[in-house]
Amino acid sequence: MNFLYFDPGLGAMIVQAVVAAAAGVLLFSKGVMYKIKGFLGLLKEEDDTYDSIDIDEKEDTDDTK
Amino acid sequence: MTQNNTRPHQASFRDPSGYMFYDGDVLRRAINPIYFKQYNALKDGGFFKTLIKNKLLVPHTQTTVSEHQIVITPEPIAFITNPYEWSFEQYKHAALHTLKVHKYALSKGFILKDASAYNVTFDKGSPVFIDTLSFDFYEKDTPWRAYKQFITHFFGPLVLASYHGTEIFKMLQSHIDGIPVKLIASLLPGKSKLSSTIYTNIHLLAKMERTHSEDYKAETKIAKLSLKAQNNIIDNLFDFIKKLSIKQETEWGNYYDKTNYNDTAFQGKKTLIENWVTALKPQRLIDIGGNDGTFARTVVTKVPHVIVTDIDSNAVGYNYRQIQQNKETNMLAFVCDVLQPAPGIGLNNAERNSLVERLQCYSPDVTMALALIHHITLSGNVPFDRSAQFFAAFSKHLILEFPTREDSWVTSLLVRKREFMNHFDFYNQEAFEAGYTQYFDIQKKEIIPGTKRVLYLLKNKV
């Protein structure tokens, strides 16, 4: 079903398993650090104007009837 | 021209799902039957609706439906900027935007099949995704096919820029499909390998690409990747990019302290500009060399669309930040070097239009070039009639500030010419007027109070 009009790169397809594993470890340790920092009151406010990666899904509940 | 007064858009040929075309002056998107299933699923499941509502995707309306073709009409974008014209922060936001769209797609059973940096541009003060057909169905346990593209278009250039400065983005002009992974890896310092994110996403990727470059028969089995694992990649890239910063000192910081304005002069200039612009009632205005948008902001509430460009990427970045904070939806900032404007690139030099072509298409009612002419003339050695020709190519009215020889900036630029100083004797008002009146009529001319600078209002003879 998927059609491909550019070469995704075989190496790039294979490497993702390793990239994901490293990312998983990092995200987990960040999560732990976040909790510790939060507990100690050391969390800093972000200064970038772009918001989070997640979309506010509440907004679309009323128009997906 | 073909029948019905339609013609294809020069940048739209890579994806078989559909193509963009001009129907008269209106830009529309045709969808081929091969993509009907995806399109209908995206439309009926409320996917497009949510993305549009959250201002992530350019809004569109469905225009016609037949068994051979569906035509949709996207909302027009005032002016398209390309990745090599973005400041660091804009580039970063375009990357974050792409990841956000992909993550949402994954949560709804789709993928972003194409992570080209040209699928994002800036409109209404924020990044927006403009390729409505970049989505496909997610197939269980498959890796992200656009992953490498994301690295070569977004992640690589951003990481490189964080080490080497935003000049790196200009490499995208010579690499329309992103900077090759191998090149990114070779340009990064050895210490970058200590970051597990950079190591895996760039250095290891480059290595794997090299190892598997001779798999001509596509025999190697592609590994599986769970949805959770793919989300980890995206989340980690998002966190990493969001924290990327750039250490790049430039002039903009205290520019207005350094220049020759005391408060009266500053106010005087603002008032003159405000009055002249207001009287012209422009729909579109561009300020070239507009720094962080200080003077464009004096008229931003009176003009429906305002563009500010500057050669200084930091000034553009600072302006972009203000646009975001003040929610100035009618202002657009981008980087441009007047002496080397972005060329037309890609197939037939027409896939991405040159800056001059885009400016002609934008057709600003007012162009402002404030305290720019001495840089063009004295630093760039451009004769007056030639810079006049440049402005005349797209401007109706031109408000130009001419610093005379007595101005301290001009004096400093002249002194730096040392023994060639006399070659620049032509830099005076008479020669300026002689050059510019070849293309423009002088409508107004006033000395900015308390300065050695003259403000001109010029009208294109054409």
Image: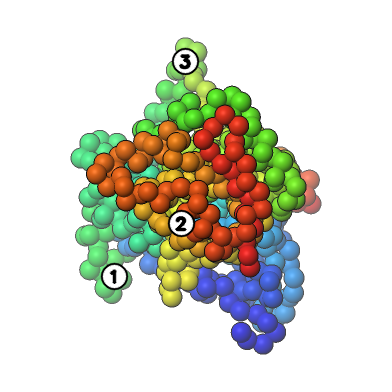
Determine the residue positioned at 29% across, 66% down.
B220
Please name the amino acid that badge 1 sits on. Answer: Glu
The residue that mark 1 highlights is B219
Choose the circle earlier in sequence order: 1 or 2: 1
Residue B66 seen by the camera: yes
Secondary structure of residue under mark 1 = loop
For label 3, the residue is A42
Amino acid type at image mark 2: Phe
The chain to which mark 1 is attached is B
| Separation (CA) of disc 2 from disc 3 | 58 Å
Instruction: Choose between B441 and B186: the one closer to the eye.
Output: B441
Alpha-carbon distance for marks 1 and 2? 63 Å
Q: Are marks 1 and 2 in contact (CB under 8 Å)?
A: no
Residue B196 location in percent, x, y?
30, 38
Q: Secondary structure at mark 3?
A: loop
Q: Which residue is mark 2?
A: B384
Quadrant placement of the C terminus of chain B: bottom right
- The residue drawn where x is 42% and y is 46% is B375
Amino acid under label 3?
A: Leu
Q: Nearer the viewer, residue B402 or B393?
A: B402
Is B269 or B57 nearer to us in this picture? Answer: B269
Residue B154, horizontal then vertical, whole percent = 42, 50
Count neighbours of disc 2 (C-alpha within 10 A) and say few if under 14, some if 14 to 19, many if 20 or more.
many
Residue B39 lies, with reference to residue B79, above or below; the image says below
- State the residue in front, B5 or B362: B362
Work out whether disc 2 and disc 3 sit on a shared chain. Answer: no
Q: Secondary structure at mark 2?
A: helix
Determine which quarter of the picture holds residue B439: bottom right
Q: Position of residue B89 (x, y in %)?
A: 48, 40
Above-or-below relation of A45 to B71: above
Indicate the position of residue B392 as horizontal and vertical percent values. Answer: 56, 62
- Which of the two discs, 1 and 2, sits closer to the camera? 2
